[in-house]
Amino acid sequence: MSEEPKILLHPEKGLNPHMTRCTTCGKDGEDIILLGIAEYKFVCNDCGMTHYGFRSLKVCEQCEGRNLKKEEIKYGEKLPGKCRKCREKEDEQQAKIEEIIAAGGIMMRCEECGMEGAIKPNNPICKAVRLKLATPSGPCGIEFQTCSEHSGVVSA
């Protein structure tokens, strides 16, 4: 018999449910997050990742940074999530990116702003990247250092 995930109940708040707020548009999300005994959020000052827990967290799970700020999760505080409209829009954008990649385009990411997308196959940057990497087909990509490098180039 497989082990189902378990939530440790908070002694006073039980499942400790929290509604979500869409991180894209700011409207109410449609999910309910059950935190159980988790009463703190730990925000990494190095990468911005937020972790939830009930004990002190020493190291960020994403960047292994040790500069974490501990904050109590307030009663009724809405946690990060997505609304249906924004989730559907992201799914459509992802499908468009996958379509461009399948047609011979390349993936892209900007280190400065974190934007991700695809560059169409007929774009000179796409052709140059494929030539330099000697990858005529299949997935490959480029990472720009600043936003000015990708301005007007990205398709999705």
Image (cartoon, rainbow, N blue to C red):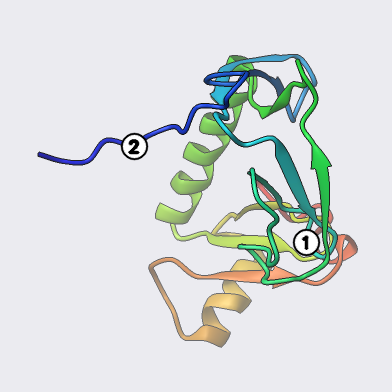
Expressed as whole percent of the image width and height from the top left, the position of residue 126 reads: 60, 67
In the depicted structure, whether residue 13 falls above or below residue 137: above
**Position of residue 80 measured from the top left corner of the image (x, y, whole percent):** 70, 31
Picture quadrant where residue 81 is located: top right
Circle 1 residue: 47
* Kind of residue at badge 2: Pro
> The disc labelled 1 sits on which kind of residue?
Cys
**Quadrant (top left/top right/bottom left/bottom right) for the C terminus:** top right
Q: Residues within 10 Å of mark 2 (few under 14, many from 20)?
A: few
Q: Please give the name of the residue rendered at 45% of the width and 45% of the height, measured from the top-left corner.
A: 99
Q: How many marks?
A: 2
Q: Is residue 156 visible?
A: no
Residue at figure coordinates x 57%, y 30% from the top left: 35
Q: Are marks 1 and 2 in contact (CB under 8 Å)?
A: no
Measure the alpha-carbon separation of dots 1 and 2: 28 Å
Q: Is residue 46 left or right of residue 16?
A: right
Q: For mark 2, give the secondary structure.
A: loop
Residue 10 figure quarter = top right
